[in-house]
Structure formats: structure tokens, C-alpha cells
Amino acid sequence: MKIVCDWDLVVAPLDVAWLEWLVKVSGDCVGFCESVKNVDYDLTKYFPGFREKFNIDPYGFLDNPHLYDTMGCIKPMANFLEGVVKEGDNALIASVTKGGHLSSKHKHVLRTLPTIDFGKGSGNGFFATKEKYLLPCDIAIDDRAENLLYFPDHVVKIYYNTMYKDLYLEELKKKPNVVVTGLYNQAETCWQVYSMLKERGEINV
């Protein structure tokens, strides 16, 4: 079985690091309730006038070539990916990568998933791409509905739910084989879906 999994906000807490940086630079006290899905992905909207006040690009943090060098991870999802590979299946990490932090992100993947063999012929891999749907798989996991819309109908599409508003979610729900996680215990839902397909022997690729 092959699983295509997004990285940012699913395994890497990029939003947490960005928010901490914005708060540190601005001195503003900004926080969100993670149990309500009403936050904008663009966190700069909660720091009006940031660029003018501090003469710093609020998006500059995301262009840091060392962005992932000291970043932690969302451990339950890391455990899930390592677990499915231990079961003999494959993990394909697919993530949109901007700026010059490709190397930093790749190293973060290897550091976060040390038990997974990403060598040639292993069946596991890291792909810096927007066209995730071109990767053949049985399960696709992403926190953005837009990235799941174009996967083939037979692929089980797990929407990794977060506190962020998503304009494409309702459209995704109309597609076949869609599972929407709760705002908590997302990894548990991934395990449940994976185990169900494993038991049924529903391997489409």
C-alpha cells in the first residue's frame, strides 16, 4: 500500500513556528482556539501593519533557508508514517516547497522519520511538488482540501482537519472516498482508515 502524505501542518508544525516568530517580532499577544475552525491560513492578517511598523516582510520567515533546521514535529503523525512502513507499506512525502528551504525540509523529513529507508529502491520518497495527485497511491493525507480534489476516485482521501478555514472543503466532501478527521486525534483516524484497508486487502496501486 502506498500513502501520500503532506508535510506542513500534518507532520511539521510550521504554523506554530511562524506564529511564534510574528508574536516575538511584533510584541503582540495573538493566540487561537484550536477547537474552532475559523482561523485564516495567512497569519499576517492578525498582525496589521507589520511590514510598515518593523520594516520586515512578515512572509520572510517562510523563505528562511534554515526554516526546518530546529523545528519539532507532530509526533503522532510521525509515528503513523513510521508504523505503516514497518508494516511493509510505503510512505511518499509530498509537500509544496517555496523559497530556498528545500534542503532544510528534506533533512527535517529524514530526521523526523529516522526508521524509514528513503534510499533508491525502497519505495519511499520525498517529493517537493504541487501536483501531489500525480503520485500513485491508495491513501492521500493533506490539511488542504484543494490538494486532495484531483486524486483519482479510488484513492481514500483523508482530510487532516485543523483550525484553519478551508474554502474547498465542501467541494471535497462531494468526492468519493473522503474521510474528514476531527480537530483532535487526526493520527488516530489515519490509523483507522489504514487498518480498515489493510484488513480488506484493498490495495489499488
Image: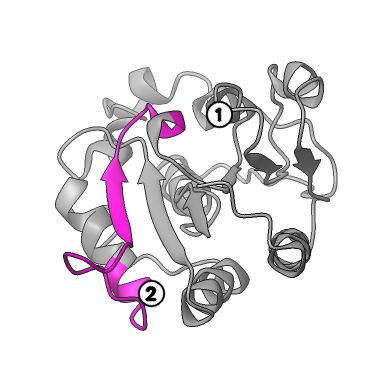
Judge from the rendering whether residue 85 lies leftward or rightward of residue 120; answer left or right: right
- Res. 198 in view: yes
What mark, if any, has residue 142 been given in the picture? Answer: none
Q: Is residue 47 magenta?
A: no
Tell me the CA gap for discs 1 and 2.
Answer: 25 Å
The residue at 27%/54% (across/down) is: 105
Q: Dot 1: few (<14), some (14–19), or many (≥20) neighbours within 10 Å?
A: many
Find disc 2 in the rendering and name its residue.
113
Q: Which residues are magenta?
A: 110-133
Q: Is residue 131 magenta?
A: yes
Q: Is residue 44 above or below residue 135?
A: above
Instruction: Report whether 82 appears left or right of 190.
Output: left
> Residue 37 in the image: x percent, y percent?
80, 36
Q: Is residue 127 left or right of residue 37?
A: left
Whole-percent x and y of residue 150?
55, 22
Judged by its main secondary structure, the magenta piece is: loop
The residue to which callout 1 is attached is: 151
Q: Secondary structure at mark 1?
A: loop
Query: Is 150 located above or below residue 92 in the figure?
Result: above
Q: Image quarter for residue 38? A: top right
> Which residue type does callout 1 highlight?
Phe
Residue at (38, 45) in percent of width and height: 94
Residue found at x 27% / y 69%: 122
Q: Residues within 10 Å of mark 2 (few under 14, many from 20)?
A: some
Residue 20 in view of the camera: no
Name the residue type under label 2: Leu
Q: Nearer the viewer, residue 151 or 185?
A: 151
